[in-house]
Image (tube, helix red, strand yellow):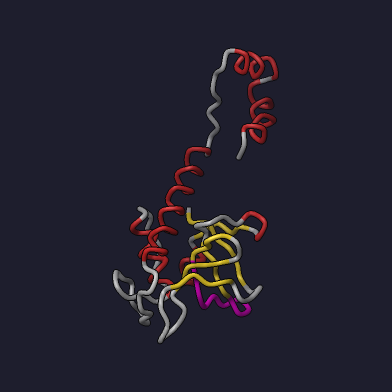
Amino acid sequence: MTALNRVPHFLARAGTASALTLAAVGGSVVVPGAASEASAAAVATRALQVAASKKGSPYQYGATGPYRFDCSGLTLYSFKKAGKRLPRTAAQQYNRTRPVSVRHRKAGDLVFFHSGRSVYHVGIYAGKGRIWHAPKTGDVVRLQKIWTSSVLYGRVR
């Protein structure tokens, strides 16, 4: 969120004269929730770095690291190392995130693959339409282009 996006909200609360005075003296505005958004972004960035560091680790069903992973085990491990706890399965993780539109997705958001109402796979969004994930038996943790439009995005709170 830029300072320009915050001005109308601030003006509505503090009044135009107060905002202009604050701007003239070089004061700063404390925006409720901005610190928690910044903190969440830092956690997401760290989780993305952890997932990337596991490149080449073998897939193993039910594994949560540190050397082998299944899809939700990789996201659980990555966010845990970044200081945030997630539930075990992809579906449980989906229910613990805040939905994000494709337009507003950011690196570090979780990408949930679904069939109808059933979530069956999860990865960490890396930007440019790619995810870090543990794909399937016989494969390894890797960066891959998202291959379907049947995905939902969620931001870890």
Instruction: Give the percent coordinates (x, y) of residue 117.
Output: 60, 76
Q: Which residue appears farthest toward the left when viewing the image?
A: 66
The boundaries of the magenta stretch are: 114-123
In terms of depth relative to the viewer, which is nearer, 23 or 147?
Answer: 147
Decide whether residue 119 is among the magenta residues. yes
Identify which residue, 119 or 44, lies in the foreground. Answer: 44
- Quick check: is 129 in the magenta stretch? no
Task: In the rendered view, tell whether residue 7 sits above or below residue 138.
Answer: above
The quarter of the picture where residue 149 lies is bottom right
Q: Position of residue 48 (x, y in %)?
A: 44, 59
**Residue 10 location (% of width, % of height):** 64, 28
Q: Quadrant of the N terminus?
A: top right
Position of residue 137 relative to residue 5, above or below, is below
> Can you name the residue that lies furthest to the bottom here?
138
Which residue is painted at 57% across and 71% down in the image? 145
Is 109 or 99 nearer to us in this picture?
A: 109
